């Protein structure tokens, strides 16, 4: 980690974390189970076959940042009902706590916040299953953002209003590249975790790490 980045980290007052594929791996069976429930819900309520339901699910995700937004806009599906239904799973059966991750997060100075496009109580259940609930002061999900998902600028502005954080003194950690650009524009220090593609020197990514624990070790050791 270079000196300029280390200097910025020393001024950080808030750590904002994405949830899925950041605090837990997307390869988890939980992610697959939620996806299956989404596809089945779309097929049933939009009255399409499974293949079309899967296509709509993926199309709306890429088009709007969250499948639920496209469903509400084009199919008049009740967003709250969709979010509650697709996340109504026993998260403890598919997620297990990571003691090292928990220790690293606990060592971070300042405020800790989750910022997710999930809803329907998903963030609450994930943190409970990972035994991280006590380490986060605020869970900001798509419902709190009035169904405005990342990467729409309004979602980030709503987060700032709701939490009172100062972007120039905050870190935003995320696995989805496109979700970092609006955060960087507001002044967040941006961290991409997971695989990366294309130009390694993308201007709106301040730091890259292969996973969250690697970044946290680097940030805490500097």
Image (cartoon, rainbow, N blue to C red):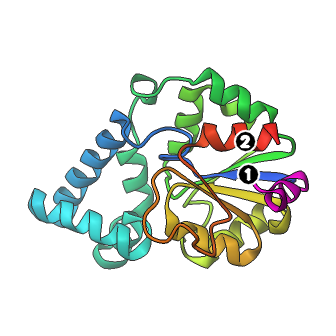
User: Which of the two residues, 64 or 200, is positioned nearer the viewer here?
Assistant: 200
Q: CA distance from mark 2 to mark 1?
A: 7 Å
Neighbour tally class for label 1: few under 14, some 14-19, many 20 plus, Cα within 10 Å? few
The vertical placement of 221 against 1, above or below, is above
Residue 5 magenta: yes
> Residue 57 location, x and y as percent?
27, 63
- Indicate left or right for 33 with 144 as reference: left
Residue 93 visible in rendering: yes
Residue 218: mark in rendering: 2
Residue 30: mark in rendering: none
- Indicate left or right for 79 with 55 as reference: right
> Residue 136 location, x and y as percent?
73, 40
Q: Quadrant of residue 211?
A: top right
At x 72% / y 35%, what residue is drawn? 105
User: Which of the two residues, 54 or 169, is positioned nearer the viewer here?
Assistant: 169
Q: Quadrant of residue 181?
A: bottom right
Q: Quadrant of residue 167?
A: bottom right
Which residue was labeled with disc 1? Answer: 1
The vertical placement of 94 against 159, above or below, is above
Q: Are marks 2 and 1 in contact (CB under 8 Å)?
A: yes
The residues colored magenta run 2-11
What is the magenta segment's predominant secondary structure? helix
The vertical placement of 205 against 29, above or below, is below
- Image quarter where the C terminus lies is top right
> Residue 23 location, x and y as percent?
56, 40
At x 49% / y 23%, what residue is drawn? 96
Q: Earlier in the sequence, mark 2 or mark 1?
A: 1
At x 51% / y 58%, what residue is drawn? 117
């Amino acid at each position: 980690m270079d000196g300029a980045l280390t200097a910025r980290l020393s001024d950080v007052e808030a750590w904002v974390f994405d949830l899925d594929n950041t605090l837990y791996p997307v390869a988890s069976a939980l992610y697959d189970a939620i996806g299956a429930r989404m596809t089945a819900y779309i097929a049933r309520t939009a009255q399409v076959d499974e293949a079309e339901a899967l296509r709509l699910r993926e199309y709306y995700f890429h088009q709007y940042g969250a499948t639920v937004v496209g469903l509400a806009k084009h199919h008049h599906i009740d967003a709250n009902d969709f979010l509650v239904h697709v996340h109504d799973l026993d998260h403890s059966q598919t997620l297990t706590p990571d003691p090292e991750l928990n220790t690293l997060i606990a060592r971070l100075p300042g405020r800790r916040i989750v910022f997710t496009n999930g809803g329907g109580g998903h963030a609450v259940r994930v943190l409970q299953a990972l035994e991280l609930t006590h380490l986060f002061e605020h869970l900001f999900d798509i419902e709190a953002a009035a169904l405005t998902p990342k990467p729409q600028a309004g979602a980030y502005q709503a987060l700032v209003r709701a939490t009172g954080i100062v972007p120039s003194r905050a870190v935003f950690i995320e696995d989805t590249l496109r979700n970092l650009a609006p955060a960087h524009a507001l002044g967040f220090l941006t961290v991409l975790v997971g695989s990366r593609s294309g130009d390694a020197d993308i201007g709106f990514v301040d730091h890259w790490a292969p996973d969250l624990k690697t970044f946290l070790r680097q940030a805490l050791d500097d």
